[in-house]
Each structure stands twice: as C-alpha cells, then as structure tokens.
Amino acid sequence: MSDTKIYQASTTAPVNIAVVKYWGKRDPKLNLPTNSSISVTLSQDDLRTHTTASCSSTFASDTLLLNSQSQDTSGARTQACFRELRALRAELEASNSSLPKLSSLPLRIVSENNFPTAAGLASSAAGFAALVRAIANLYELPATPTELSRIARQGSGSACRSLFGGYVAWEMGSKDDGSDSLAVEVAPASHWPTMRALILVVSAEKKGVSSTSGMQITVATSQLFQRRAEIVVPAAMEAMKKAIKEKDFESFGKVTMMESNSFHATCLDTFPPIFYLNDVSKAAIRLVEDINNAAGKIIAAYTFDAGPNAVIYYEEENTAAVAGVIKGALGGLEGWASREIEPKESSALDARAIGVLRDGVSRVILTQVGEGPVRTQESLIGADGEPVKK
Amino acid sequence: MSDTKIYQASTTAPVNIAVVKYWGKRDPKLNLPTNSSISVTLSQDDLRTHTTASCSSTFASDTLLLNSQSQDTSGARTQACFRELRALRAELEASNSSLPKLSSLPLRIVSENNFPTAAGLASSAAGFAALVRAIANLYELPATPTELSRIARQGSGSACRSLFGGYVAWEMGSKDDGSDSLAVEVAPASHWPTMRALILVVSAEKKGVSSTSGMQITVATSQLFQRRAEIVVPAAMEAMKKAIKEKDFESFGKVTMMESNSFHATCLDTFPPIFYLNDVSKAAIRLVEDINNAAGKIIAAYTFDAGPNAVIYYEEENTAAVAGVIKGALGGLEGWASREIEPKESSALDARAIGVLRDGVSRVILTQVGEGPVRTQESLIGADGEPVKK
C-alpha cells in the first residue's frame, strides 16, 4: 500500500529593497549578476509572502497557486528551484533509507502576499525566497540560508537576498557554475534596528520594460554600464558595508541615493533608453532633497527599483522630520493609518513637487528593517491537501 | 578735433544643436571642454541672432542691448570677448598707422533674436557668435572663423560652433591656454543639404539647473562621467564624422540619440541629480521610436540639450513619414504654418505618448541645416549711434 500522506511545511518571507543595485546578468540562465549588491530586508508585518509547500502521491503534478491564481510552473526558473531542492532531498534520502521519498512526489505550493500586487512592488524576491524556504522546510534540508540563496537566485536574482533579515549582500562570485554567487548577512536587523522605510506608491500608467529583459539590453548597449559594474559598484559595496557596520546614516543615505541614480543613469544610457523614473519619481527626489536641506544633513535617502515607486529610508529618531513632514504634505493618502505619525508642517518643501506628488502617489507604506523568513504553523493547505479557502 | 564718427558693422548668426554633446569644462574660465563635440547649424531663416556692433568716441562706455533689454557687459565672458577682439584690432592698428584707433573706443552692441526667448532655445550660442562676428566685421579683422571660434568659445562654449554653417566640430584641444580648442567645419551645409529639424518646444514649469553650473557638478560628482569623456565621446566623434561624410542617416541618427541619452545619463548620475528630460520629453522619444519602428529603420533622431525641448532630425525624403506623421498627431500646435507639411495619419504611434505631447508641447519649429554667420547691411543702430526703434 502506497504512502498517500500529505506532507507540508509553511514559511513567510520578506521583501528586500536594494541600496546597492543589481542590474545586469553575466549568465541569464543561472541569474549570475555582473555586480554584487546590498539590500535592506523590510518587515514582514507590512510586506511578506506566506507560502505553504506540500507534496503527496495523491497530487497529479507540480502546481503553484499565488493569491488564488494558478501559476505556470513549467518556466525554467521555477523548474530550476524544484530540481535543485529535490536533488538535495534525494541526497538525504540516499543517505538515510528511513526517510520518506518526498523528492519523487509532486509538489503543491500555495502562496499569498499581504500587500496589493497592484502596488507594483517587486514581489518576485519575496515569492521565490518563500518558495525555496518552504520547500526546504518540507524536505527538512539542513542547508543554511546562504546555501539556499544559490537556489533562490535561480528563481529570481534578488530573491537570494530575501533569505536573510537585516542588511544583506549578494556577492556576485566569479565561478561559471554560480556556486559562489551567494547571499550573506552584512548585519542582522538587531544591529541597526532603527532603520525605517516609507514607500510612495506611484500610480504608473503601465508597466515599463521588465527588469529581466531591460537589464540585458543595458548590458548589450550601454556604453557607461561597464564602468558602473567594474568601478562604481565595487566602491559602493565597500562604502555601504562600512556605513552599515558603523550605523552611519549620512554615508548610508548618500551611497543609497547615488547608487539609485547610477542604476537609472545606465537605464537611460541603454538603447533604446529605459525610463523607470517619471515626473512623480522626480518630485519624490526633490522632496527628499528639500527635507535633507532643511536638516542640514542627509536624514532621508531615496531609492527606486525598476519602477516609479520611491522607497525613502530614514532613522527612527528622524521620524518627525521625514515621515511627519511627508504626512504633513501628503496626509490625504491611503496607508498612513498603519503607524502613528504626527503630521508636521514644513515651509522647506517645493510646492510644485508636492502638487505633483499629491496627484501621482496612490498610497504610502510605512515599514522598517525586519527579519528573514520565519517558519509558521499557519498553513495555506488543509489536511485534505486542498488550498484553504479564506 | 577728435573723431566723432559712428563706426558700425552687422551680422546674423545661427543657432546650432549638438549631435555629439558638450558637457563638462576642464577650465571653466576659458570654457575649455572635457570632450570634443559636433553640431548641426540650423537655418537662420527660422532661428538667428541679428547683431550690430558699433564704436564711437561719443559713446560713454561699452553697452549691450539684447531684444531691447540692456545687458550687463561686466561679466568675465563678455569682457573676455571684448578684450580679445580689441587686442587683434590693436595689432592691426600698430602695423598700419592709417587705420582709425577703434580698439580704444567704447563699443555699443545691439542684438535681436527672431525667435521667442521664452521658447527655451539655447540662444547664447547664436548670441556670442553674432557678437564676436559683428565686432570682427567692425574691426575688419582678417581672422578666419576658426580663429574667431577661440574667442567666441570664451563667451559661451557652444558659440564657437555657430561661426560655421553645416556640420561643425569643436575639437577640445589639449593646451592649457586653449589655443587649440577650436571649431572646424566637418562638412558644409551644401554637402548634406537635405537635413531637416523639427523642434518640439516643451512648456517647462521652470528653468532647471543652468548648464554652466550643472556641468561642473557633473564633473565633480558623476562616477560615470569620466568614462563618457574619455571613451564614449571620442568613439562618437569618429562615428559621427564618418556618418556625416557618408551622408549615412541611420548612423547619424543612432549616434545622435545615443549621445543625447549618454549626456542625460551623466546628468542623472550627478549628485544631486540633474533632470532636463521630463515626461513630455520621454513621450517625444517614444514618438521617434514609433516612427522608426514603423519605417523599419532609423529615419528620425531625437536630441535634447539642457532642457526638455526635443529636436528631431530627419532627411527631406522622409518629410511625410516624420514631420507629416507628427503633424497628423499634433496638428493643433502653433508653428506648422512655416512649411508646407501634409498631415499624415499613422496607427503606429502610442496613444498615451501623443496625449502627453498634446498637453505638454507649446509649439513646433520647422527648420533645416543652414549657413554660418552672414554679413548684412541691415543695421540695428542708426547713423546717430542710437538703437533703431522698431
């Protein structure tokens, strides 16, 4: 009689927002980058993917359900994650014959985000980190987060950084097989727990060029890109690690802003050019510049991924001067209720920029540095193997 | 009895729009650039400065009137032009004592543009070229346009290119005194007379960072700039000269667009970042991309100076496919009447981009490659030495 048990395990995983940007692959199949990167992991209280991985001989095939929508699992990236994780499980099974042969069973993955997909936040990092972490839990793999990062990277490059909390580096590595292209902790969240992030979600007309295709066009056509990969980013990596270790926000903020600008500059230098920043993004930059000028030093730092949303980092002690001032100018937006922020009037803000932001920002998200994936007993799959109806 | 005669001479001078961009000074006082550049001189039928230079012992001091507004002549740039031209005149006077001693007489310069200053077109190039050419005419200097370019460059860097018609290079030179940083003709307008330009004048909210201060912040802070100056531009200079010599529009257009993007990328990589392109500029880029995609090759090329206006180059044979299609989409704008262009419907254009352009473009200017400064008998100063009232 065959084993018809439903095996399952669940995890949550966080979003991360890079402060030294990943842009460009030296190997598109293995998602090996042209430069290293560093990110801050954001709190899962505000932004997280929750994933349950299960396997059973009663399942017909590998399936993936995200926010109740069936997803294609035949893509090379998802397949690579499944294959690598099954291989690690098969090694365990080979060395201990008492273990159930999970590696050969079909997988059923159910996943949910606690933030609106429409917000345009890069959810693939949290998604692939949760998928890999959940299956590793299911398979009871002894692999460390860094070992798992090699696998998550093949799902989505930046996913490798979401296997850690706090401040995380993705070291690009040099080997052709990608075995040394891994995520490592720069510092845990507890080292610098006062880091806050305010996200201005910009209502974009439509999705621009996807990051996957965009970065490869940049590598192929930008005449400034090589300089960025070879000279600019290695210097930024060193400066950023030092800033994090010393909890030096002024350095952290300056490198963060210059890195974002450098990345978007190489997008503009791509042919045809790629524009992720729009006039609303530029108004957010002006807002941060005005806040910093009023403070006489860098107390807020903007960064933009492959889209118009502004992520603004600041320290808790400057909540009034950053989040408070922004709430004073943009208090009408959705999202302020999640934290107690006292709105503060400021005469230092450019009125035109504020008008552009009022028209173009759809909501704010208030969050902070947070922990890495957390195992949870809360399951998205019932004992019958079916997704839990909510 | 002293000489109370009013001496005078007049010229017109053209606007030029760079296709390999000048951005960055290695010597701000002498306006010595960090890289060479190439421009197309535009027809004076559409865009020109008209300048009369006069001198007389009856004048109290050096004065400059531009569009009936008195201008400060005490600035280092204007003073440098006056001083250099007077020195050349003084040499002539020293070698031929029969010449009147104009070099010691106060100068009165009167200047008018035939295009609205509000259009945001860089008028300083035409302005300083006309000023230098008019005084050289007044002083009857035997200097060649290249020799005069050394002087005009000190007024405004790009002015040196407006001393020639057609296709003009400003070779950066290497000497500290700037004596080899000069404009030279790449090809006369007659070599490739079919070059057309359509300018979309964008209604900017306000003037951004001035190019003079902006380019020095770029030199000081952009980490990508050095690569542009040392590697990217020298290659673009060679490719552009070849394209012009061979009248190869596809190469001309590709280098023009990539050069504009590269320049604006280094602006974005400046800290704090400089943005000259806005969402309307980006819509103009999309418009050109759509036109080229419909044609299956590059028949139109955008370029942007230190502002949001789009200059679109195309060849006469593609008037219908470029200017006709743009008129079909943006026919309601001011400026179309200056040329006979048949509006043409096209389904290849992005509707969103057209909407942005309809809202954000204030007028079009239709023009073409043109000649260099032309001496004229039409004077802006009467026989009494007073500006002619219009």
Image: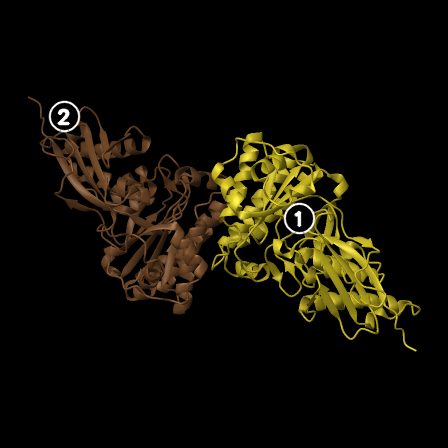
Chain colours: A brown, B yellow
- Give x and y (percent) for residue A293: 42, 66
Query: How far across and how far down the image is residue B115, in percent?
Result: 68, 53
The reply to whether residue B296 is visible in this rendering is: no
Q: Is residue B70 above or below residue A15?
A: below
Q: Residue furthest bottom?
A: B1
Does residue B376 appear in the picture of this structure? Answer: yes
Question: Residue at horizontal 75%, vertical 71%?
Answer: B62
Residue at left offset 35%, top offset 56%: A312
Badge 1 marks a residue whose secondary structure is: strand
Residue matched to label 2: A57
Query: Is B358 placed left or right of B104 in the picture?
Result: left
Q: Which mark is residue B38?
A: 1
**Residue visible at 69% across and 62% down in the picture:** B155
Instruction: Determine whether, in the image, residue A16 is placed left or right of residue A230.
Output: left
Q: Quadrant of the N terminus of chain B?
A: bottom right
Q: Picture coordinates of residue A309 (x, y %)?
A: 37, 49
Residue in the foreground of this view, choosing between A107 and A170: A107
Q: In which image quadrant can residue B95 be found?
A: bottom right
Q: Quadrant of the C terminus of chain B?
A: bottom right
Q: Amino acid at mark 1?
A: Ile
Secondary element type, mark 2: loop
Horizontal relation, residue A110 to residue A288: left or right: left
Q: Position of residue A33 (x, y in %)?
A: 39, 43
In the displayed structure image, the side of residue A246 where residue B266 appears, left or right: right
Crowd around label 2: few <14 · some 14–19 · many ≥20 (10 Å):
some
Chain to which the residue tagged by mark 2 belongs: A
Give the residue type at disc 2.
Ser
- Depth order, front residue of B55/B96: B55
